[in-house]
Image: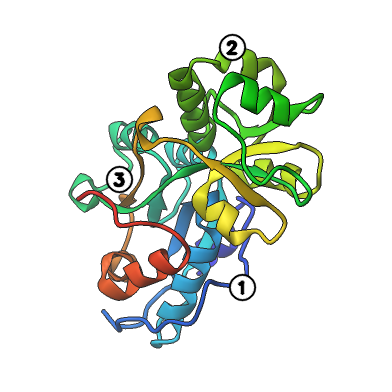
Amino acid sequence: MNRILAFLLPILIFLTGCGASGGDGNGPAGEAPLVLAASSMQETMTEAADAWASEGHERPVVSFAATSALARQIESGVDADLFVAADQDWMDTVEASGRIRPASRTNVAANALVLVAPPGGPDAVALTRDGVLAALGDGRIAMADPAAVPAGKYGRAAFESLGFWSDIAPRVAQGENVRAALALVERGAAPLGVVYATDAMASKEVRRAATFPAESHPPIVYPMALLSGADGEAQAFADFLSSPRGQQIFARCGFVAPPR
């Protein structure tokens, strides 16, 4: 437990989940696993941690941040047990550094990319140059860092596929992660934002104005892997996330089944 208390990443544990669920009771109770998870998984991982604890296990400690930031922490040697990323590229980077157990890597969830607007904004926006620019007006579009953070990278790829990224790029209000981008729209600081479908579902302050075609960006898949120092309790929690009960939690929060 001391290594968890000494962990210096911001621990953002959100107490509201997407619904009640029970764990599957795998494995004996032990030291709480330290889980590093993409910021878009806040509600899901919180509910999963609660469900796991309800079965008599130590409640996993979960740190949420941009996948890129978590990957860099892992590469620098942070002592954690389980990594859940929002894209394959950053998991590939961590795997190449020798910090994960390759045999433990699996896809745990998938998502969609959407355009959101604040209350009072448009109910629907055409995903064309003219449609998006008209909805923006004099404002900016909130996105996670399109050079590094998965949600921003997916957004950039989508606009490039649709043919007008060059028009959007100068208008980006950049957030450090997808939830920071969502917050800009929630506060009315940006008239549009690019986030995941699950982020839009989790927020009571935005409306979904459009869904990007799946073929306009790489598949949004969340890989999960044990880190090299993980123990049996971390393995048991990872197994729970991939189990039918764990997948029910993901589904309740808006995720879809991943490719295996």
Residue 181 appears at what percent x and percent y? 67, 40
Element marked by disc 1: loop
Q: Which residue is mark 2?
A: 166
Which residue occupies 62% across, 67% down?
14
Q: Quadrant of residue 189?
A: top right
Q: Foreground mark, 2 or 1?
A: 2
Element marked by disc 3: loop
Disc 2/disc 1 C-alpha distance (Å): 39 Å
| Closer-to-camera residue (197/247) | 197
* Left or right side of 102 for 63: right
Disc 3/disc 2 C-alpha distance (Å): 37 Å
Sequence order check, earlier mark of 3 and 1: 1
Three-letter code for the amino acid on which mark 2 is drawn: Ser
Residue 76 appears at what percent x and percent y? 47, 36
Q: How many marks on residues? A: 3
Disc 3/disc 1 C-alpha distance (Å): 30 Å
Q: Please determine whether, in this image, residue 19 is positioned above or below residue 254.
A: below
Which residue occupies 44% across, 69% down?
252
Q: Which residue is mark 3?
A: 100
Q: Which mark is residue 215?
A: none
